[in-house]
Amino acid sequence: MLGNLTMLVGALPALVVAVISIIPSLAIGVASGILIYKKIMQHRKADAESEYARILEEANAEAKDIRKDAMIDMKEEQLRLRNEFEKESKEKRIEIQRHESRIHSKEDSINKKESILDRKLEQVDKTRRDLDSREQRVKSREAEAEKHQELMRAELERVAALTRDEAKELIIKEMESDARKDAVNLIKEIEREAREEGDKKAQNIVALAIQRCAVDQSSETTTAIVSLPNDDMKGRIIGREGRNIKALESTLGVDIIIDDTPDIITLSGFDPVRREVAKQTIEKMLLDGRFQPARIEEVADRIRRDIVISLKEAGESAVSDAGMFGIHGDLVRLLGRLKFRTSYGQNVLKHSLEVSHLAGLLASELGADVKTAKRAGLLHDIGKAVDHEFEGTHVQIGVDIAKKYHENEKVIHAIAAHHGDVEATTVEAIIVQVADAISGSRPGARRDSIEFYVKRLEKMESLANSFAGVDQSYAIQAGREIRIIVKPEKVSDAECVLLAKDIAKKLESELEYPGQIKVNVIRELRSVEYAK
């Protein structure tokens, strides 16, 4: 170890000399490297500056191209916007022209209606003037009668030597007879003129409405008939110890009547929807002849679901046919329930739709609100859809339903007044009354039970026979006309007019009937003498 150290110390001076000799060479190399580096950097700087100039020139050229492209795109966009603006302007001008044409047509229609209204006002003024002139004639006749009365009283007192009271009573009777004759003649004249002016137009309106709106009728009431393929099916329907028929009546909620009538059974129930479900359920089960309590419930549930869908579709179809929109969904479903409801043998849904069409036609002829009249006509019998579930008349139930679903006040009033339960205060309510009467009284629309029909005819004849001077009365034309034969020695020709009016008023107040009844009073005088 010490030997090695001694050798290292001996060699140290030689190393120092070698290092010192290398230092100048290193300094020269470093200086030359620095010079070379500076030249390289200067060369790179010149290259960078030339590259910068080239890139700047290319950027300027590209910027010019971009600006040029941008200007072209901007001009194309301006052209496109100008074309779109011109197109929209043209469409707007066309739309404005269409609006102007519609406005002009509406103005023409309003002008026509104003001219019609002016003509009607002129007719009313003319009628008022005629009534005033008639009133003046009546007053002049009254003055003449008073003068005649004074003359008669003086003459009677002079010639007959009657007392004042006796003469007064005689004159009063004479004046009463003359006044009655004058009143009858005046009534005849007024009625004749009114008929000439009003009957023709009214008949045309009503006839047009009926002609344009005619629907079929239904004869279903509170029973339904199910046809059987053979009488053996009655035994299957009844089942062992009546098990099947009990299950059917319990599940379907109707009475099943099985009698000796061949190949049919009768279903009885007040709920028309339930009755229809029962009918379709039994018809479905007749296809395979398997009547089992579990199967009865299964088929009945499936039929009920189908019926609910069909009722909604029927209501929507009626609303669509009537051209009504915005009716609450529950009201639409209630309208559908009327599909299986009948009144006097007339299908209530078809009747409601018919009343809606008639009301719309009449309203358009009379210048009333067509939409309100049609809507009220469609909903006027809505209470009949659930009248077997709630207490009260179908009118009151319908009013409550309409209020519940926030119908228009005019529609609610028309529903309340369509049977005269409240006084009609709007034109639309009166139109619904008339349309309801037309639909119910048109030939073949409704049918009465034999008992009700006979009682109504007997009541008509008994009311007519209760008047003094009536000899015989006959109800004809299915109760739409009554002919009354009077005793000629007790009723004069002039009194026949008043008698017809009195009988008509009594029939209106004491008898319920669809449509109208014609009261025809006939007086015939026969003078018989024998030559001997």
Image (cartoon, helix red, strand yellow):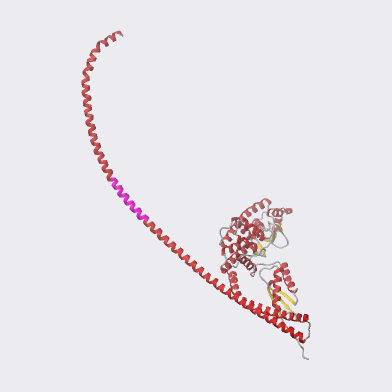
Residue beneath the point at 36% across and 55% down: 80
Indicate the quadrant where residue 467 lies.
bottom right
| Residue 261, x across and y down, in percent | 71, 63
Seen from the viewer's position, the closer of residues 444 and 487 is 487
Kindly identify the residue that appears in the image at 74 percent across and 53 percent down: 241
Most foreground residue, 328 or 428: 428
Please provide the residue range marked out in magenta: 62-81
- Residue furthest toward the bottom? 532
Which corner quadrant holds the N terminus? top left
At a point 48% along the width and 65% down the height, the residue shown is 103
Residue 80 seen: yes
Nearer-the-camera pick, 270 or 332: 332
Question: Where's the C terminus, which quadrant?
Answer: bottom right
Residue 177 forms part of the magenta stretch? no
Vertical order, 507 against 305 (above or below): below
Which SS type dominates the magenta stretch?
A: helix
Tell me where residue 228 appears, x and y as whole percent. 67, 60
291 with respect to 43 (left or right): right
Say above or below: 524 vs 435: below
**Outermost residue to the top:** 2
Please state the total of marks drawn on the protein image.
0
Is 290 situated left or right of 42 in this image? right
**In which quadrant of the rendered view does residue 360 lie?**
bottom right
Considering depth in this image, is 135 or 416 the residue closer to the camera?
A: 135
Residue in the image at 21% along x and 18% along y: 21
Task: Report whether residue 229 is seen.
Answer: no
User: In the rendered structure, does residue 76 fall within the stretch colored magenta?
Assistant: yes
Residue 313, position as x, y percentages in the image: 58, 58
In the image, residue 432 sits, relative to residue 176, either above or below, namely: above
- Residue 355 figure quarter: bottom right
Q: Position of residue 319 (x, y in %)?
A: 58, 60
